[in-house]
Image: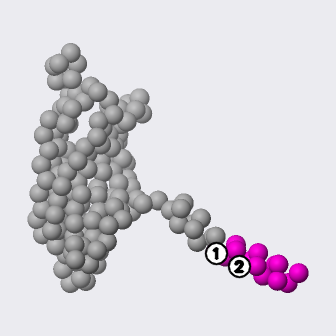
Amino acid sequence: MKKIISAFLLCVMLLVPFNVFASESNSDAQYIEYYEDGSYAIIEIVDSGIVARATGVTKSKTYTYYNSDNERDWTVTVTGTFNYDGKTATCTKSVTSSEIYNNSWKVTASNASKSGAKATGTFTVKKYWLGIPTKTENRTVTLTCSKDGKFS
């Protein structure tokens, strides 16, 4: 009987770390910006899961726009690769990407840049009605790495 209980406890101990890992979010930070027209955006720093000594750490910062009806319209993202050692941090690569969920919107311009420990994406997103732009959103998304590897 003791062997059965021991085997059961061993199985439970082996399974618990997998369940905890599976339920963890890959988001490092999240906050919400609210706008006067009832729309809002969720901004998240997401771990890409890529960690390699030769290339550094890669993270993404996403800006997801929701209209006043709580419908997701679009997401713009800047992804940066960073090296840090406790004394300094450097961004070695910066790229932008976007995703449209509402066909009324289009990303009309995007640009990636890097400077020091920052990866920056600048975006122009326009809403169209019958081919005429009715709303323009200009967004700058900046991902910063501290010398200790903390991202904001």
Looking at the image, which residue is at 16% across and 19% down? 132
Look at the image and tell me in which quarter the N terminus lies: bottom right
Tell me the SS state at disc 2: helix
Q: Quadrant of residue 17?
A: bottom right
Looking at the image, which residue is at 22% across and 62% down? 80
Q: Tell whether position 23 is magenta.
A: no
Q: Quadrant of residue 23?
A: bottom right
Main secondary structure type of the part rendered in magenta: helix
105 vs 45: above or below? above
Report whether 24 appears left or right of 15: left
Residue highlighted by disc 1: 14
Identified by mark 2, the residue type is: Leu
- Asked whether residue 150 appears in the rendered view, the answer is no
Tell me which segment is drawn in magenta. Answer: 1-14
Point out residue 136 in the picture as x, y percentages from the top left corner. Answer: 18, 32
Identified by mark 1, the residue type is: Leu
Point out residue 152 in the picture as x, y percentages from the top left corner. Answer: 29, 63
How many numbered tags mark residues here?
2
Point out residue 121 in the picture as x, y percentages from the top left corner. Answer: 17, 52
